[in-house]
């Protein structure tokens, strides 16, 4: 009798757990749907005529590779890069003022003349050893990781 | 992200499943005879969207319908004060194009593809041309991107041979086009996917121009690629946010798998 009751309780407990998990997953899904609608800061600033570029951060075994798409930037002399151990700042001047009529939410003319973005790097790097290239409007910065490696002997 | 069967249970529970999940709405009676259908969905480098947008503008195509789904984010596009859906169909004579301004949410890919392909089948299309990109890590160093084809069906294979287009022989396709390829094959629709080498994460008008040249050889609609090259910088800046959203969706659908080697047939 006791055994049957215990089994029944265990069954209901499993069922309850299942539904709790299902509920959590559903909540997570609904949350992710609303995430897209959440308001965040725009990535442009009208007063300083500044816009954030598209960037991509990639991690390889020895370095962090940051690339940025910089249309309207003509040569490397118009780009300034500043790095610390865990950030990279990109500042770039466009070759001309880029005007957009009725820009998004503000519905008025918008002008951009520079890019600015500070990227938080996923790991510590050695800024002094960083290298950068700029070709076809795409910037690539390779920042070596600050890791001390100790070789291990295989016995 | 919960598995799709859980979403379906949830949708049914909410009563969403009672109606169709994806609807194609014709704003007017679309009359065509064996049309050629070009599809431009957000994908790597937004190649399809850039090219199809250019075709719509340069060829003065007319909006004739749109696609609605409860899976899509609640977005309406305003242009010249008029309301438009983000996923639309345009027409000019016997050329139909599908274009989307939103990244297709991964949960909706199966339904969207199934619905789009059966609608195209109903229109008795002569050829379906999904336009996309294939990510190459060293795109910076490539001046003229290569365009590859994935022919589905005998007719498409003949076109590839006739125009000497390089075939995408080994690899994986992940995302909406993967399902469109599968559905076209099931529905026996001749389908020719054109994939250009492109930046994985940046809008790539150069890749779109390279694809336009190949597309023009196949369908001979007279696409002028020079505006794509002249306005490349403006396109890159304008498409920035759509690219950002597309990247987020691509991550969720495991797009990185395209870099992987297929395990079988090696």
Image (tube, rainbow, N blue to C red):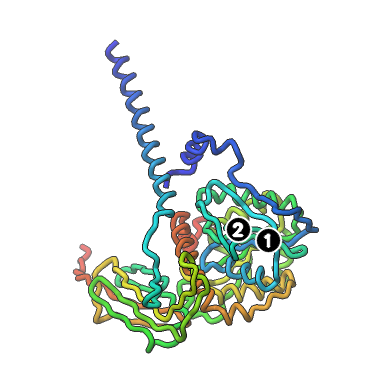
User: Quick one: quadrant of the N terminus of chain A?
Assistant: top left
| Extreme-right residue of the structure | B33
Q: Give x and y (percent) for residue B133.
A: 55, 67
| Marked residue chain, label 1 | B
**x, y percent for residue B180:** 62, 55
Q: Residue at x 70, y 66 (%)?
A: B61
Secondary structure of the residue carrying numbered label 2? strand
Residue B230 sits above or below residue B47 on the image: below
Q: Position of residue B188 (x, y in %)?
A: 71, 52
Q: Is residue B199 visible?
A: no
The answer to which quarter of the image holds residue A125 is bottom left
Please name the residue that numbered disc 2 is placed on.
Answer: B84
Q: Which residue is mark 1?
A: B63
Give the chain letter at badge 2: B
Mark 1: secondary structure: strand
Measured as percent of width and height from the top left, residue B81 is found at: 59, 62
> Residue drawn at (29%, 18%), measured in percent from left and top?
A6
Q: Earlier in the sequence, mark 1 or mark 2?
A: 1
Q: Quadrant of the C terminus of chain A?
A: bottom left
> Is any part of residue A101 visible from this angle?
yes
For label 1, count other residues whose C-alpha is less than 10 Å away and answer few (under 14), some (14-19) or many (20+): some
The residue lying toward the viewer, choosing from B175 and B68, is B68
């Amino acid at each position: 009798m006791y055994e049957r009751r215990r089994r029944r309780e265990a069954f209901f407990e499993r069922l309850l757990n299942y539904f709790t998990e299902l509920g959590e997953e559903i909540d997570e899904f609904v949350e992710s749907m609303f995430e897209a609608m959440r308001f965040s800061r725009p990535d442009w600033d009208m007063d300083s005529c500044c816009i954030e570029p598209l960037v991509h951060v990639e991690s390889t075994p020895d370095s962090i590779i940051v690339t940025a798409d910089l249309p309207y930037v003509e040569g490397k002399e118009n780009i300034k890069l500043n790095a610390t151990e865990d950030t990279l700042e990109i500042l770039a001047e466009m070759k001309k003022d880029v005007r957009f009529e009725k820009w998004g939410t503000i519905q008025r003319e918008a002008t951009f003349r520079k890019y600015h973005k500070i990227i938080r790097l996923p790991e510590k790097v050695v800024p002094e050893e960083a290298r950068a290239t700029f070709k076809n409007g795409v910037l690539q910065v390779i920042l070596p990781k600050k890791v001390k490696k100790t070789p291990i002997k295989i016995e | 992200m919960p598995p799709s069967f859980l979403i379906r249970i949830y949708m049914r529970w909410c009563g969403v499943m009672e109606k169709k999940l994806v609807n194609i709405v014709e704003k007017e009676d679309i009359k065509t005879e064996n049309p050629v259908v070009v599809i431009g969905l957000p994908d790597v480098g937004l190649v399809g969207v850039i090219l199809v947008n250019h075709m719509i503008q340069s060829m003065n195509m007319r909006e004739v319908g749109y696609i609605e789904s409860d899976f899509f984010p609640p977005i309406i596009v305003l242009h010249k004060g008029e309301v438009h859906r983000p996923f639309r169909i345009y027409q000019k004579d016997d050329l139909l194009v599908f274009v989307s301004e939103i990244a297709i949410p991964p949960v909706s890919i199966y339904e969207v593809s199934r619905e789009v392909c059966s609608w195209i089948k109903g229109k008795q299309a002569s050829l379906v041309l999904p336009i996309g990109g294939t990510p190459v890590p060293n795109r910076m160093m490539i001046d003229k991107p290569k365009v590859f084809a994935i022919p589905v069906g005998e007719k498409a294979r003949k076109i590839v041979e006739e125009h000497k287009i390089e075939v995408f022989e080994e690899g994986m396709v992940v995302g909406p086009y993967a399902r469109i390829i599968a559905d076209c094959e099931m529905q026996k629709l001749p389908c020719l996917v054109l994939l250009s080498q492109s930046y994985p994460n940046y809008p790539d008008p150069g890749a779109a121009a390279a694809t336009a040249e190949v597309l023009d050889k196949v369908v001979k609609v007279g696409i002028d690629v020079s505006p794509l090259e002249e306005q490349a910088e403006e396109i890159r800046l304008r498409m920035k946010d759509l690219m950002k959203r597309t990247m987020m969706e691509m991550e969720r659908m495991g797009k990185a798998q395209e870099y992987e080697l297929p395990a079988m047939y090696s």
